[in-house]
Image: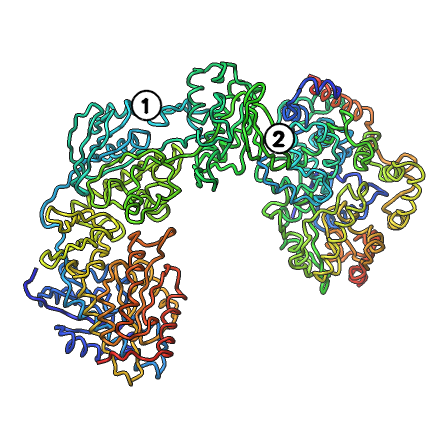
């Protein structure tokens, strides 16, 4: 199969020394195996996620994404924009749709872009990395590359919010998307059936500003995974990953629980199943270590 | 028709019948006891070869009657359709082998069941004749009378004309158009749902004027209607008093509605000039003629308007309408849009508890109203008083949980629809007898004038179903009234908006045309569509007791000058309620009579008391109960082998003589299965099941006279879905008999 | 654009004010009050007035109560309300828009933590074009003052250590860290966008 090229938007948290640098590393490992070339959008900027609304009004927030799309159009014509981050993907795709839907906003956005010497056409397909895997490769092709199946590992597929709503993955339902479960099966693992909190919110950015309320949500997400017999949780979103993983000690202290649930990215699962070592699979990035995966990676 | 009866019997061996039954013995029963000749068995009777065999015999043997001993009479009706002979069916498949276990112990009683069903079918055949149908050329009058010239009536006339039938509209007022004619605009039903269409009446009136098939009588009413489908005669009288009599084949009654009298809503300050109902607002809008809408009290331009939904309706308070009128939410949205389209800064508030917008455009129209800036407040208005600048509305905001008072320039009350259904003949009939006030649901406060002035024995107008609306069943039989050939359409039938009324009109016109054509062929209308039989009356025996004329659910029977019943066969639905009612048994049908059922039940072999083989007779309504039992058989639900089931047209046709005969013959139990009666009735003849229940409530006396336990006779309401329940009730009776013992009347 | 000017301009028509000035605010009138949004919100129990009620309050001209409410600052942007709204209202965006509008008019609750965090996030990203997680985190700890900040920092110490050890936090970021190269173009673009938006609102 010919090499596939995409215009890549990594997002702030995938930068060196940032909270999901481990995500980026496993995505790169995975893409190498799949013969995918990720062309990073030159000089990309933050999309303002969905929390910048206080300081930023509608147009200033929209032009942030508009700049990234314009840069992609200029530097990577013909390539879809792909982001591994749920918020980056949603923000970019939604901004383009809203600009295309409103001529005067589009005109204003282009007036602002001109200040940075750019122009927006707005005809890019903006996609999440998971869409690339499912739509451009498919489960069978992904499964064909498995060298070390994830036997005997039960995994809760935590889809969360922003990879699921309002766009979601084509053909999946909002209330019970199945793609992570199918992916887990493809890699030889066992998905948790009827994972109750599959699409529940972890609090997102409010984990910072409203920690108690958010941690109550996170507690339910982890508890439900334990109830389903999960050994670990897998997620496609950096905010979900971080929120669900790093507050477990605080939750344990507050609720008298004994959570120690590893939370990994799908790209880490794929990298391990494709036979890579712990470092390339970014298992060293786990705050709560995924020992079963480490064992497989060491084999 | 051949002069002598000649019965042929045909026994099917297919569908496993031959494995389970001794078909040779069945042939013996049919030949010896049933006197059938020829009598033949066939491996696959409903196959072409089997059918050809019967057809051949009918011709060569000059058969007049054919007994088919095979499956249920509801199965294979197309194969076993021999038009020149009377047919009876012995139900050996659904009635016997499918409801009995295939075991050695069961074999004997199963065979006895089958033997009996063959006996019963032969007995029925002996007493039935194939109805001749319409032998004369009747040429029914192919002309529709449409009473009411609103959009429902206008649509009905136009639709009939398009189908090639002449129509005459009789309109009470001086012009066509009715309520819709008084509207400024109509509700938008097509995208983008913001352009309110004209009321459309002028265009329809012009179309009617140009159509030579349609005649219009304005300022006129129907002062007398007589006859029956195909031969109605109506007196059409003008205000000035001149009358013409014309003949019609069928009638569409589109007499519409009146708005509920807002004067009765004293809490809403009805005397305040700036409180109007929806029709009142239409008048203001027409008056404004495209300019600013002004309020009645002082002519001030209206800058704020409130619409109070469900004013005096959907309420259990005395004098209020308990039902939803269906159109008022959309009408208020439309009226609020009148203001918003004039000036978007006019404050228009709709106070609702549940916004109901049925119909194709409904939800979209609601959105269009919201989009145009109408404010929708979920709230209940409790009072209107005179404020400083206009009527002051006191209301509870149900979402914000607040009590609010606000003044508006104008308040519009969305009151409901009161049907123009004429005289409530049932209340009228009940009033003198019981001396009680009429149903409190009936809102009519003034003496009501009849719409149709029928010269029917049972009253001047069509019967009402509920709340004064003239339907016979909202779900099962739309447009059908309980007067054959008379169809009601539009808001007199049930609350509805203009679009629905026009759909209704088209439906009613089609039904009316069907009634004319049925009358021409002598065929029954729904639900025994196509039935050619009709009541035969032996006048010599009649005691003039009037039960048949009173109980006929369809008002088909008048009285002649000598006070004998006068049957109008075109009005008849062939339910047989008259036959069930007749104490001297002088009413029958060619193919359904006291004898066809009575002789069948007597043909059953009743074993000796000491044989411990009781017999239960089941008279099952052919509409729901008998199909339910057939379906039970398809599901192989077993029931007692001591059961003998006879289908009846309606429980109303059950004459008590059958029960007396059955008890005298030694049956141990009797079950009557009819449809649900009462307010939520499912009886296909509306009143049949109810009447039967009343009659049967008196059967206990008979039982006591015979010194029998009252548990031996049970009457049940059975729905077509009672696939498990119906067999269970049969088995319950078997248990009861076991408990109380066998009947002593076995001779 | 000042609060008093807006009060003067719209008088008793807050619905219109929202429609004309709040992001996606023209959708508010399309709410049919079913309450599915309120029932679907993960923070539902913590809202002073859930979205459905906010919409009704807007129609009932409860301007002060709506704009000074902490409610819309409870939105986690999970989009559950958008996915489920039978009328397809962009509720998440309306909540962001209401929050932003309240902030602009100076009516937003000043001590609301999400209000503070959201502003810091924006300030952080617009400075260099990319978010500096370390600085953002630290500024968050100290958003309630120095003493509170030390307490929070201590509470968060273990989380920070975990991130540090796994290479997911870099103390050197404090010295500057990532950013776009074309900072001047980036900031000129933002400035222009803000000007255009201000002109539109003040119109």
Q: Is residue A298 left or right of residue B257?
A: right
Image quadrant assignment for residue C81? top right
Q: Position of residue B518 (x, y in %)?
A: 20, 46
Q: Position of residue B606 (x, y in %)?
A: 24, 78
Residue C82 vs residue B558, the one in the foreground: B558
Q: Position of residue B94 (x, y in %)?
A: 31, 68
Q: To which chain does the residue with label 2 belong?
A: B
Residue underneath mark 2: B404
Residue B370 vs residue C133, the one in the foreground: B370
Task: Answer whether residue C11 is visible to the viewer in this image.
Answer: yes
Q: Is residue B237 left or right of residue C146?
A: left
Q: Position of residue B660 (x, y in %)?
A: 23, 69
Q: Which numbered disc flags the more N-terminal residue, 2 or 1?
A: 1
Residue at image position (75%, 58%) is A232
Residue underneath mark 1: B203
Q: Is residue B146 left or right of residue B300?
A: left
Q: Residues within 10 Å of mark 1 (few under 14, many from 20)?
A: few
């Amino acid at each position: 199969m010919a090499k596939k090229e995409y215009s890549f938007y990594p997002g702030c948290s995938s930068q060196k020394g940032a909270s999901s640098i481990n995500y980026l590393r496993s995505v790169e490992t995975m893409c190498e195996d799949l013969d995918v070339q990720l062309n990073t959008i030159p000089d990309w900027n933050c999309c303002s996620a969905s929390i910048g609304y206080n300081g930023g009004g509608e147009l200033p927030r929209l032009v942030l994404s508009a700049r990234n799309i314009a840069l992609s159009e200029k530097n990577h014509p013909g390539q879809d924009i792909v982001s591994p981050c749920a918020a980056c993907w949603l923000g970019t795709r939604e901004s383009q749709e809203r600009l295309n839907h409103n001529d005067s906003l589009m005109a204003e956005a282009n007036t602002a872009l001109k200040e940075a010497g750019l122009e927006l056409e707005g005809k890019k397909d903006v996609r999440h990395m998971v869409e690339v895997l499912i739509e451009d490769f498919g489960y069978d092709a992904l499964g064909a590359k498995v060298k070390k199946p994830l036997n005997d590992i039960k995994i809760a597929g935590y889809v969360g919010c922003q990879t699921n709503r309002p766009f979601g993955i084509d053909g999946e339902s909002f209330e019970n998307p199945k793609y992570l479960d199918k992916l887990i099966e493809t890699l030889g693992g066992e998905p948790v059936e009827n994972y109750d909190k599959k699409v529940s919110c972890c609090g997102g950015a409010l984990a910072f500003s409203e920690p108690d309320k958010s941690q109550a949500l996170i507690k339910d997400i982890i508890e439900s995974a334990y109830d389903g017999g999960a050994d670990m949780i897998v997620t496609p979103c950096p905010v979900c990953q971080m929120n669900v993983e790093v507050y477990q000690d605080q939750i344990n202290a507050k609720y008298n629980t004994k959570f120690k649930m590893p939370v990994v990215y799908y790209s880490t699962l794929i990298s391990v199943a494709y036979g890579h070592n712990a470092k390339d699979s970014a298992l060293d990035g786990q705050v709560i270590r995924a020992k079963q995966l480490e064992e497989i990676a060491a084999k | 028709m051949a002069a002598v009866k000649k019965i042929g019997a045909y026994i099917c061996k297919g569908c496993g019948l031959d494995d389970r039954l001794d078909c040779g013995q069945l042939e013996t029963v049919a030949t010896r006891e049933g006197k059938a000749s020829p009598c033949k068995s066939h491996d696959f009777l409903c196959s072409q070869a089997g059918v050809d065999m019967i057809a051949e015999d009918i011709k060569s043997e000059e058969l007049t009657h054919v007994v088919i001993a095979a499956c249920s009479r509801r199965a294979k009706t197309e194969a076993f359709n021999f038009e020149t002979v009377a047919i009876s069916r012995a139900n050996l498949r659904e009635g016997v082998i499918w409801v009995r276990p295939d075991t050695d112990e069961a074999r004997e009683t199963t065979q006895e069941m089958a033997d009996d069903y063959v006996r019963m079918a032969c007995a029925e055949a002996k007493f039935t004749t194939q109805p001749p149908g319409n032998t004369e050329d009747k040429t029914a009058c192919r002309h529709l009378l449409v009473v009411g010239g609103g959009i429902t009536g206008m649509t009905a006339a136009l639709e009939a004309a398009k189908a090639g039938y002449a129509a005459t509209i009789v309109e009470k007022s001086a012009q066509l158009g009715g309520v819709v004619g008084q509207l400024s605009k109509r509700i938008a039903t097509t995208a983008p749902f913001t352009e309110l269409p004209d009321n459309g009446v002028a265009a329809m009136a012009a179309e009617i004027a140009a159509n030579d098939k349609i005649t219009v009588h304005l300022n006129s009413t129907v002062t007398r209607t007589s006859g029956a489908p195909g031969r109605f005669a109506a007196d059409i009288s003008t205000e000035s008093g001149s009358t013409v009599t014309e003949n019609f084949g069928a009638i569409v009654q589109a007499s519409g509605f009146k708005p509920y009298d807002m004067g009765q809503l004293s809490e809403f300050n009805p005397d305040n000039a700036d409180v109007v109902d929806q029709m009142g607002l239409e008048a203001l809008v027409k008056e404004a003629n495209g300019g600013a809408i002004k309020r009645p009290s002082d002519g001030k331009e209206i800058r704020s308007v409130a619409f109070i939904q469900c004013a005096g309706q959907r309420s259990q308070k005395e004098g209020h309408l308990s039902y939803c009128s269906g159109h008022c939410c959309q009408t208020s949205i439309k009226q609020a849009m009148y203001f918003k389209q004039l000036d978007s800064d006019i404050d228009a508030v709709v106070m609702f508890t549940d916004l109901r917008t049925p119909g194709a455009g409904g939800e979209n129209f609601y959105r269009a109203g919201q989009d145009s800036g109408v404010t929708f407040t979920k709230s209940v208005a409790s009072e209107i008083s005179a404020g400083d600048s206009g009527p002051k509305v006191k209301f509870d905001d149900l979402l914000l949980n607040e009590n609010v008072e606000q003044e508006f320039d104008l308040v519009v009350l969305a009151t409901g629809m009161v049907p123009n259904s004429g005289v409530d003949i049932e209340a009228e009939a009940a009033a003198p007898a019981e001396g009680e006030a009429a149903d409190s649901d009936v809102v009519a406060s003034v003496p009501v004038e009849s719409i149709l002035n029928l010269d029917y024995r049972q009253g001047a107008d069509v019967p009402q179903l509920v709340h004064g609306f003239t339907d016979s069943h909202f779900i099962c039989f739309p447009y059908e009234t309980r007067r054959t050939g008379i169809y009601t359409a539009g808001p007199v039938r049930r609350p509805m908006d203009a679009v629905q009324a026009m759909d209704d009109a088209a439906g009613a016109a089609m039904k009316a045309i069907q009634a004319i054509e049925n009358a021409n062929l002598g065929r029954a209308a729904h639900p025994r569509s196509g039935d050619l039989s009709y009541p035969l009356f032996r006048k010599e025996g009649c005691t003039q007791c009037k039960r048949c004329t009173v109980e006929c659910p369809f008002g088909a029977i008048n009285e002649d000058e000598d006070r004998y019943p006068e049957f109008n066969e075109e009005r008849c639905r062939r339910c047989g309620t008259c036959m069930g009612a007749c104490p001297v048994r002088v009413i029958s049908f060619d193919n359904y009579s006291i004898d066809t059922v009575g002789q069948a039940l007597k043909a059953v072999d009743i074993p000796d008391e000491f044989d411990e083989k009781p017999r239960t007779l089941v008279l099952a309504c052919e509409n729901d109960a008998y199909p339910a039992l057939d379906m039970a058989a398809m599901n192989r639900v077993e029931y007692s082998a001591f059961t003998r089931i006879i289908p009846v047209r309606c429980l109303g046709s059950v004459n008590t003589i059958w029960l007396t005969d059955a008890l005298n013959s030694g049956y141990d139990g009797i079950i009557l299965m009819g449809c649900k009666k009462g307010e939520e009735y499912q009886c296909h003849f509306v009143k049949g099941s109810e009447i039967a229940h009343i009659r049967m409530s008196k059967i206990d006396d008979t039982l006591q006279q015979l010194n029998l336990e009252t548990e031996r006779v049970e009457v049940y309401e059975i729905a077509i879905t009672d696939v498990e329940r119906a067999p269970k009730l049969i088995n319950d009776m078997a248990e009861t008999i076991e408990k109380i013992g066998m009947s002593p009347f076995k001779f | 654009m000042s609060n008093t000017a807006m009060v003067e301009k719209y008088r008793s028509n807050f619905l219109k004010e929202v429609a004309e000035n709040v992001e996606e605010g023209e959708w508010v009138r399309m709410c049919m009050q079913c309450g599915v949004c309120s029932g679907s919100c993960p923070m539902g129990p913590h809202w002073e007035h859930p979205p459905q009620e906010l919409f009704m309050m807007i129609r009932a001209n409860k301007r002060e109560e709506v704009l000074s409410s902490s409610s819309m600052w409870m939105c986690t942007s999970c989009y559950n309300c958008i996915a489920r709204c039978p009328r397809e209202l962009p509720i998440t965006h309306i909540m962001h828009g209401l929050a932003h509008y309240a902030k602009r008019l100076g009516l937003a609750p000043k001590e609301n933590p999400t209000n503070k965090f959201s502003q810091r996030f924006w300030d952080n990203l617009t400075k260099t074009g990319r978010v500096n997680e370390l600085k953002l985190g630290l500024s968050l700890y100290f958003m309630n003052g120095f003493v509170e900040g030390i307490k929070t920092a201590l509470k968060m110490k273990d989380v920070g250590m975990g991130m540090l050890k796994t290479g997911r936090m870099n103390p050197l970021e404090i010295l500057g860290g990532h950013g776009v190269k074309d900072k001047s173009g980036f900031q000129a673009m933002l400035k222009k966008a803000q000007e255009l938006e201000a002109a539109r609102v003040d119109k």
